[in-house]
Image (cartoon, grey):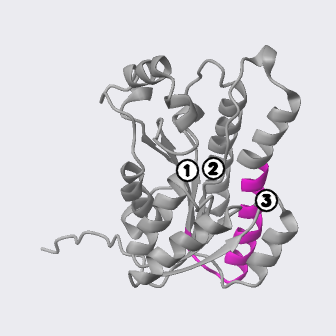
Amino acid sequence: MDYPQTPSFRLDGKNALVTGAGRGIGMGASIALAEAGANVTLVSRTENDLKNLSNYLNNKGYKTSFVPMDVNNELDVKNLIEDSDPFEILVNNAGTNRPAKLVDTKIEDFDYVMSLNVRSVVSLTKVIVDKMIKNEVKGSIINVSSQMGHVGGPNRTTYCSSKFAIEGFTKSLAIELAPNDIRVNTICPTFIQTPMTEPFLKDEEFRKNTIGMIPLGRLGEIRDLMGPFVFLASEASSLMTGSSLLVDGGWTSR
């Protein structure tokens, strides 16, 4: 009898690009992919954060490089991809949130959130996928969504709109790219303790109410997402595409 072997979680020799890599979730993804053997290109607007992270990983023997860049700048994105080898792994992580009641939402805030959370993802993915297809490169695209891409929440009409858009984009692109053996999935975290969520979580009432919505009874940490990133990037998830990996402590189970 032929017994099955566990697929590899290793990413040795694969080229990965992570946006919003300087801190928070993107930092965690970058470390996880590098530790799994990938050659990771770190991208964000914060050059000092990128330099520090790249030095940290390279000093540990991993392979990284960094490019300070605004992913909303389509010319810079195009130049980066044209000058790079094809990427087998893309983590679209750059994003933001400007919570407000709908009646108080400024249209410029709506435009800013949608531009970074949606338009930049579509623009960057388009250029990377084009090069993957032309070079017959198989791979994995991981879009960082949110539990708020599956449920609603007060003061989150703009943010939820952007993440529901990412969920739809992911499912459609997964079908489109399946013949090319390029998989597309989302990771959907609950509230993770990061620099972006820190201002909200300092409010003790907000923090208490948030934890009260999570059946596991705690906020997420960056390390909670590092395994899922490696899983979705590796052959261990080779039959997954168009899926949402909810890392939400049970929030959406209610």
Where's the C terminus, which quadrant?
A: top left
Instruction: Check the image and report above or below for 107 versus 3.
Output: above
Ranked by sequence position, the earlier of labels 1 and 2 is: 2
Query: x%, y% of residue 157?
Result: 70, 24
Badge 2: residue crowd in 10 Å (few <14, some 14–19, many ≥20): many
Quarter of image, res 88:
bottom right
Name the amino acid type tagged 3.
Ser
Q: Residue furthest left?
A: 1
Are the two marked residues, 3 and 1, in contact with CB atoms closer than 8 angstroms?
no
Residue at horizontal 41%, vertical 63%? Answer: 230
Q: Which residue is mark 3?
A: 123
Ranked by sequence position, the earlier of labels 3 and 1 is: 3
Are the two marked residues, 1 and 2, in contact with CB atoms closer than 8 angstroms?
yes
Residue 245 highlighted magenta (yes or no) = no
Name the amino acid type tagged 2.
Thr
Instruction: Check the image and report above or below for 102 versus 141.
Output: above
Query: x%, y% of residue 21?
Result: 58, 62
Residue 124 highlighted magenta (yes or no) = yes
Quarter of image, res 46:
bottom right
Can residue 38 be seen by looking at this rendering?
no
Q: Which residue is mark 1?
A: 242
Q: Which residue is mark 2?
A: 170
Instruction: Quote the CA–CA distance across marks 2 and 3.
Output: 13 Å
